[in-house]
Image (cartoon, grey):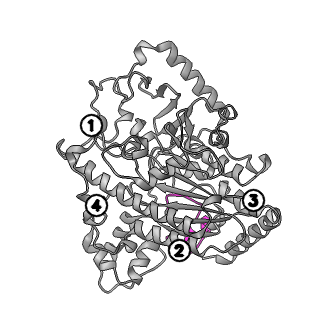
Amino acid sequence: MRKTGVLQVTAWLAAVGALALAVRADERSHVIFIEVDDLTSKYIGAFGARHIRTPNIDSLAERGVLFTNAIVQGCMCAPSRNSLVTARYPQNLGLYANGDIRQLPADTWAFPVALLEAGMHTAWIGKSHLLPWIDDQDGPSGDRKTAAMHRQMGFAEVWQSAGRHVALKRARELAKNATAEWQGGIDAYADHLHTKGLLEQFVADGRRPTTLPVDDYLDGFVARKTVDWIEGYGRPEPFFLWVNFSGPHAPYNPPAQYLSLYDPSQMPPVIVDHDGVDIPACLRPHEWTKPREEVSAQRAMYAGMITFIDEQVGRIIEAIERKGIADRTVIVFFSDHGIMEGDHGLMHKETLYKEVLNACLIVADPRAPQGRRVERPVELLDLAPTVLDLAGIDENQRRHAFGESLLPLLRDEAHGYRRTFAVAQIRDATALVTDRYKYIETPEGPVLFDLADDPDERVNAAAGHMPLCREFQAMLAAWRAEHGPVIPPPPTRSSTGDDDG
């Protein structure tokens, strides 16, 4: 691996940033992103859930701003996460679904680069679906990706894993050949388990509830690593830390006690369409294939996994408070997307229903008004210019970033936020979401949900509102012209080496 160049670039960027912010460092907030995978908002107490306990996430909403209509731009892990880090839409990247591309072009800009140049210390901990350019790196795949995240994406520190699914696959492959020596550098979590002598136990557990110590189960390990990082941080400059949990993404295999926390009969009722005959096939890519009676049982396990993740979030919040930096640390909690879990007869994601589209976004800024709810549409991508604003980065340095800074909304100055609709994309459809409507453009014709009269999105109202549909169609056309280039998806998907996120 070519480590020398990475270290030189990182050192140079840090030196430039130190000069730029030497006087202002103590005036800046630390920023922590806490990103979770596959979390649907109706499973969080602060968003209205009464069937589940999420006290730590709820506490962030109490001390911050909850966004009830925050829209993800991509509806699977890789499209959502790479859209956010590059402040670009799926159409700009040609990345609409996992596997559409293997890596981003070598010259792709990412917003943490601007933070590092401006003197913030940047770090990544956890699961990663980022796709930096790795072809100029040598060595095992995990090490190559880590080096590329340093060099291309602006993270001074990186601990990343492809997740529980990939680590298990890697461990099983090695287990088949008892004489094979362990090859490190492919996945950092698998390396951790191998080092601690826990790999055989991890393989034996498989997709069943883990018997590993909590701090060695991936999401507990990410929490422990994050706590240690916060407690050990001693640099003078403010930091930007991006923490990525693997859960509540399947497999739902936390310690067994979490899977029996909730009664399946108490789970939210499944949303059933009136008939669904006028819903295009591209919005129904993954039909529920299990027996219908299993929906509630699976939802209860999902809820238990969420409560486990909530406890790990609590560990991070407590570490911030113990460190004495809570009064100058902005905590941003969000999901990359949600998951269907039986609603509309669907499973997985890669669709544009609200269960997938809403990002569970909460921003807790100790210097802003607290306990507020924002109902107007915002985009997950807006977090990029928001953090650049928090870092005091000027317009010239952020010229690559799409999105609108959320700072006016955080400060209760709604007139300063210009967005009137949010956009999300999958391979064959684009959604435009306003405060009342969701319009979806597909090759099979339009879909229109009136969110005021039909909040569960059960009826396609397009046929009775064609003038409104044409208005939304024109708005999307103008939006595309302003947010190019438009790169169509490839005819086939490549293998990314990551899981099915």
Give the residue at x 40% y 35%.
Answer: 353
According to the picture, the residue beneath numbered tag 4 turns out to be: 258
Task: Say whether disc 3 or disc 1 marks the residue closer to the N-terminus.
Answer: 3
Q: CA distance from mark 3 to mark 4?
A: 42 Å
Closer to viewer: mark 3 or mark 1: 3
Q: Is residue 124 visible?
A: yes
Task: Say whether disc 3 or disc 2 marks the residue closer to the N-terminus.
Answer: 3
Secondary structure of residue under mark 3: helix
Up-down relation of residue 392 to residue 154 (above or below): above
According to the picture, the residue beneath numbered tag 3 turns out to be: 27
First to last magenta residue range? 128-149
Disc number at residue 270?
Answer: 1
Closer to viewer: mark 3 or mark 2: 3
Secondary structure of residue under mark 2: helix
Up-down relation of residue 118 to residue 198 (above or below): above
- Circles 1 and 2 in contact, beta carbons < 8 Å: no
- Circles 4 and 2 in contact, beta carbons < 8 Å: no
Q: The disc labelled 1 sits on which kind of residue?
A: Val
According to the picture, the residue beneath numbered tag 2 turns out to be: 228
Give the residue at x 46% y 65%.
Answer: 315
